[in-house]
Amino acid sequence: MSTFENQILRFLGQQVDFVDAQTIAQAFDVSPKTVYRAVSKLNQDDIVIESQRGRGYRLVANKILPANTEQDTQRQHDLVISLLHAFPHSSNRWQLLEKFYIADSTLQKDLTTLNELLNQFHTSIDRSAGQVRVVGTETQVRKALNYFLLENRLTQQVVEGVEGVFPDISPSDQAFLSAQMTLIEKELNVEILDPYTINIFSHLYILLNRVRQHDVTHEPDTDTGVRGNDLFVRVARQVINNIGEYTNITIDEQEINSLVVYLVGLRYNRDLDMTQEGEAQQLVDYLVDSLTLPTHVNINNLKKGLIGHVRPMIHRIKEDMLVVNPLITDIKFSYQQTFDDIKAIVNQTTYQISDDEIGFLTLYVVRALEEASAKKRVLLMCSTGVGTAQLLQTKVKRAFPDFDIAGTISSREYQEHLVDYQDVDLVISTVNVQFQPVSPVIQVSALFNEGDRRRIEEMLYD
């Protein structure tokens, strides 16, 4: 059950009568459509919310509200972050019970849940001799810590500043790390786009703390050479050297490799790393070609937008890097069908793509759909399809530059091929239509005057 579904149940549990969808939507700053979907999902297996036309929704009287899943989730996040911070050391079980004010049975249940979550980072939780510790490598633990640290904060708020995500950071550390972010952008000549900005900041923040604690335990690496694009390596080396000077601690050479991995895995405002170009293009082509999209969607623009995300996404998948999508819950509710369609398609590939990544892909597709729906698709119709047609097209295009002109045809051609023009928003015709059209038709002068323009505006936009 999602957080939003749980909130609806608790909201209705506080009401004495039916509440309409609009009131619920306003209470959570969502659309009524989102409320309809959530209620439908809650009633999928058993009717827990009853509805009456004209009155709204009410919790079924004999249903018990679920446990406080929000509180449980927050506690589990705090617990896993605490254990990851302690790596490679163990945490005493009794100290954990006191720290989180929970019973031993709750702790064991939480640890079982967290063990499953940590599997995606190839790490696990060991419980023995009254101790609890994370089992894994330094690299794996840092990736897990980076993810959970951001997921813990960003699911509660879209980034409003570093202080909101890292409340314990000192002003001097914040200034230093911000300077390193500026250095990265300047040396690479790029602007790192959100939410990846906070992702790389988090990586540097974790590195800084781990180095200070002297708890860094790098796994043996048979390949000690630094790998990657020369530009990335040079910038990563400069940042790592700066951290070493800032902390007055000698930092292992492997940290350069780790930072290079993160730099390559970020989304930039221009192309830097082309190593996944062919592979990314194949995945984008497969995804877009498998989707059922309206004919007026600009496929080329959609693919161009997706390729910029998919290329570093493939790198992240191969390096077991997970990014946090702060809007994932809203995306799933607002664009559920598109999200589900994309997820079904990518599940047919060999890539293990997280819901957070699928959420980002969904936004690209939704944007293309909304841009297509905002641009009116118009068909021009003349008696023969020639003659005054060119003049009409020029004048219409000048009056409505956002129109997508589907073509200029004769009335006979249109009548014979009605099925081919079902997705047209408007037919602008210089002749009187004597048959039943499949789209709205407005008759205009062959010379297309000011009155014609105004009537089209009123018909489409009023």
Image (cartoon, rainbow, N blue to C red):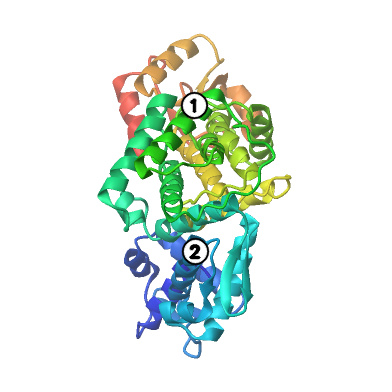
Q: Is residue 36 above or below residue 9?
A: above
Counting from the top left corner in percent of width and height, residue 97 is at 47, 81
Query: At 29% from the left edge and 21% from the top edge, which residue is drawn?
Result: 450
Whether residue 44 is visible, yes or no, is no
Q: Amino acid at mark 2?
A: Ala
Q: Nearer the viewer, residue 109 or 91?
A: 91
Mark 1: few, some, or many residues within 10 Å (few <14, many ≥20)? some
Point out the image quarter for the C terminus: top left
Residue drawn at (42%, 73%), measured in percent from left and top?
8
For the image, the number of numbered tags is 2
Residue 367 visible in the picture: yes
Q: Which disc number belongs to residue 234?
A: 1
Instruction: Say which label, 1 or 2, has the lower sequence index.
Output: 2
Q: Is 90 left, or right, of 345 in this rendering?
A: left
Q: Secondary structure at mark 1?
A: helix
The image's mark for residue 406 is none
Q: What is the three-letter code of the residue carrying label 1?
A: Arg
As displayed, is residue 389 above or below residue 292? Answer: above
Q: Position of residue 402 (x, y in %)?
A: 41, 26
The residue positioned farthest toward the left in the image shown? 171
Residue drawn where x is 47% and y is 55% of the image: 334
Q: Which residue is mark 2?
A: 86
The one of 231 and 218 positioned closer to us in this rendering: 218
Mark 2 closeness class: few <14, some 14–19, many ≥20 residues within 10 Å:
some
Nearer to the camera, 380 or 76: 76
Give the SS element for disc 2. Answer: helix
Q: Residue 275: x, y in percent?
A: 63, 28
User: Do callouts 1 and 2 mark residues in contact (Cβ within 8 Å)?
Assistant: no
- The image shows residue 423, relative to residue 48, as above or below, that is above
